[in-house]
Image: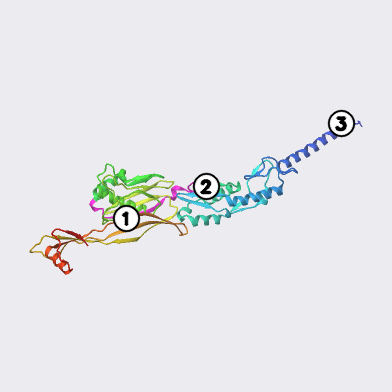
Amino acid sequence: MKKRHPLWLFGIVACAALIIFTVQYSVRSVASSLFQTSDGYAAGTAIGSVDVAGLIREQAEQKLSQKEEAWKADAKLYLQYSTARIAVPAAIFAFDSAKSTARIRNGVNVPAAVSLQLDKLQLLLGEQLQPEVVQHLNVQQLQQDLQSAAAQLQQTKTFHLLSYMNQKEAVTAVAESSVSGAGPYGAPLQQWLGGHGTVTVPAHGTVSLLSLAKGSKLDDKALSFVATLLYQTILPTNLQVQERGISTILPAYAQLGTEARVGDGRTDFVFANPNETDYTLQLSLQGGTMTAVLQGMPLPYRYAIDRSEITLLPRGTLVQVAVPNEEHDAVSVERKGADGRKVEVYREIYNGNGALLGKERIAEDAYLPVQAIQDVTAVAAAAAVTAAGQTQAPAASATATK
């Protein structure tokens, strides 16, 4: 039998030792890169925005818990939809500091362990926004994004809800109104509608009725009829009136508090769209009734118009004393006159729960009284003066107001 050389055995032992050393070093290196050492976590180790480098696990958990409480007190997360801005209460988030520190890896930023219950988010949305908005939201995706922001302990962030909606499916009729009495203006209105049956109300833009009617055959009365219809349509929405006039006497086709007048090429009807998306007005004329339908994304809140504050402005009587007339020496009424009225117009804003959020004054419309006129002959006037105990009769052609 051939005798093995001692150097060969030495080589085997050396190789085995090298393998053992390499394995031990590798394990220690991996463990050091993943978990804390006796000197604490390595540089770059963080949970969300909380730096835990140099800390051991217990210290990291304590620091994270303090930062989470501070975040709950100071965080400003918002949901933005149209003109509605909803603060997300930090109390609906549940943090787990122990679970977060169990995720720590040396030199790596890991998210904090946090949860947001879906039913709490749906309750928040349902309390604030109209059902037509909530039903078109991808609430699950919104939940994930809110949790991600909280997991990084982001102090401020706004989530635009339009990006969580299928906007084509969400478009609806948000307001509709009709005004009767278009008969005298039927032909020119029908001709104008041929090119303006659909009016776009641009996002953050304005619409001017005089601009729309430029070059048309619509006179001031026809334009005022259209202005009244448009005003009546946008009143129960969040669209804003920027310019509007009213008549001295309320037209027969208008209700008190809903009239708008355009005239003289100077008085315009202008309104603005404060929303993030365009809206369209669909206009139509059937018989003597003109209809407007406002279409677009659902409005954030429900709007209602209050026109209950009405003040009566009593008419007076204008007495005209005429020259004596042998045939007519009694009182004759020339004009009955009419009482005036003043109305305060308010827009009420309600959230998804039906709670009143606010009430804004839109306008104060006043239609002055029309004085009654009475003609009184000198004979009747003298008799009235005598009966009143006066010694001097009024001079002919004098005018007085009761």
- Residue 156 versus residue 130 in the image, above or below: above
Cα separation, mark 2 vs mark 1, equals 40 Å
**Residue 365, labelled with which disc?**
1
Is residue 309 one of those drawn in magenta?
Answer: no
Is residue 183 one of those drawn in magenta?
Answer: yes
**Residue 158, labelled with which disc?**
2
Left or right: 48 in relation to 344:
right
- Residue 105 versus residue 301 in the image, above or below: above
Amino acid bearing label 1: Asp
**Between disc 3 and disc 1, whose residue precedes?**
3
Residue under the image location 71 percent in, 47 percent down: 57
Residue under the image location 34 percent in, 54 percent down: 232
Quarter of the figure with residue 318: bottom left
Residue under the image location 28 percent in, 51 percent down: 225
Q: Which dot, 3 or 1, sits closer to the camera?
A: 1
User: Residue 142 placed where, x, y %?
Assistant: 53, 49
Element type where label 1 sits in the image: strand
**Residue 342, labelled with which disc?**
none
